[in-house]
Amino acid sequence: MVLLIVAALVLLSTQFSESESGPLHSMQRGVASVLGPLEEGASRALKPGRDLVNWVDETFQARGENSDLKAENAHLRAQLAKAQSAEGENQQLRKLLGLDRAGTLAGYTPVTARVIGRSPTVWYSTITVDKGSSSGVQMNDPVVSGAGLVGRVTDVTNGTSQVSLITDNRSAVSARVLPDGPQGVAEPEIGNPDDLLLDFIDRNQPIHQGELVVTAGWSNGAISSAFPPGIPIGEVSDATVGEQETYQRVHVTPAADIRDLEFVQVATGGPPRPGVPG
Amino acid sequence: MIVTWRIGLRIAAVIVVTVVLQISFFSYLAFFGTTPDIVPLMVITLGLLGGAVVGAVAGFATGLLLDSALLGTMGVSSLVLLTAGYLAGRYREGTEISNSLVPPLLIGALTTGVAAGFAALQLMLGVHAPVSLLVLREIFVKGLLAFLLAIPLYPLIRRILRPAIVDDVVAGTARGPITAGAGRARRSRTRRVRRLARVS
């Protein structure tokens, strides 16, 4: 027991101190590469089951519905689970194509990837996708869904990549509120994946509910944001100012449905981003 | 638990399948805004069935696999899970489990402890973002979901590891030697006895 605890602590401290190319990171990527195909197979095979269970949960939450309609719906849903799953995939892919055409990812080579795994805890809000360095994916590449910003690539193996979502505790995205343009930093609130906090917005700046928040995509020549400008992050849901505070407390509802991602687009290549390791 | 290499293989298979299922299936589900976590459930079950050493080793290995698969910080999950596995094993070694509700209750309580321990470790390691009070809901709902999931999953894992469980082997020896197909023969004998009872 003591030996195992010591081993765990040694692993923990070694991982923090070693570089990205260190032996522990390499071993980790090796295991992730081996498990990648297993995860992909399991993810595809279990998708109808996931859809069905999630639908049951959603139905449970919708208390106001008529019970007869619910029963009928349950019957129809069970029959159409597979068909809806395919249609949902199709819609997500169409939206991805739309965002790509909108020009926000101009200069990038978008790589569409399927989500094959997700972290079970709110402390690490990450997903695993089925595209890796063999498809041109690199560290810190921006990741979007049809609705908006999802996160950025934080680790890459040959066939898979880990994406840290904008709701991950290590995430901070420089953002701009439209139309007036005050800039701040969009951070997650751990434990609440449906909410982001936009920090460093001056208390005198007028912010209104419903205003769109997009990536700022700044650069000062030496360092720059990892994200290109103009990608939708979310919509302002609330803005409050404390009496003694310099900055406003702006709540943002993420544009992308972070909990229900099936496909995402990794923006590979793109213009050089000074200070962003790739 | 009598751990032979065959049982070791079964335990390894249970660990791999659980981790893959967690990442590819359970992590996508949401009940009351929380994702069910079957990884601590499996480790605690192994501790309850196999004792402190089996629980701790299984917890350590599962944590390593989970952190590797998710490319997370190695050692964090291992530390929390090996403690949970060890505590479950110590409980089993010191107490007789007489009620079938005890394992799910214990799994629920220890899973709550795992979620709280994981949160505490993360806070100690440093968190850059504000923490919502909803984290508390997450911790308790995870425990509740583990309790509910343990009702079908604890007997399932017990069944997979049955040849190694001392209680079952002793109980089986009292009735006769355990051989291949003995379970089938016993079921068939029971059916015959019930049929005779109905006739008479």
Image (tube, rainbow, N blue to C red):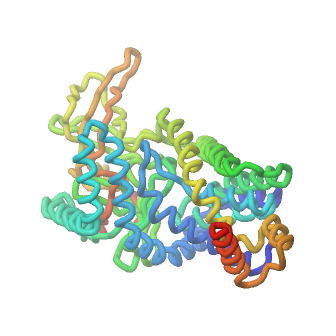
Q: Residue at x 22, y 29 (%)?
A: A207
Q: Is residue A46 left or right of residue A250?
A: right
Pick the front one: B90 or A107: B90
Q: Residue at x 64, y 50 (%)?
A: B104
Quarter of the image with the C terminus of chain A is bottom left
Q: Is residue A3 left or right of residue A231?
A: right
Q: Residue at x 34, y 66 (%)?
A: A48
Question: Where A219 falls versus B189 (above or below)?
Answer: above
Pick the front one: A22 or B95: B95
Q: Is residue A144 left or right of residue B133?
A: left
Question: Where A5 falls versus B119 (above or below)?
Answer: below
Quarter of the image with the N terminus of chain A is bottom right
Q: Which of the 4 image quarters holds residue B121?
A: top right
Pick the front one: B137 or A137: B137
Residue A222: image x %, image y %?
36, 54
Residue A72: image x %, image y %?
23, 53
Q: Which of the 4 image quarters holds residue B32?
A: top left
Residue A227: image x %, image y %?
31, 55
Q: Is residue A5 visible?
A: yes
Q: Residue at x 26, y 48 (%)?
A: A70
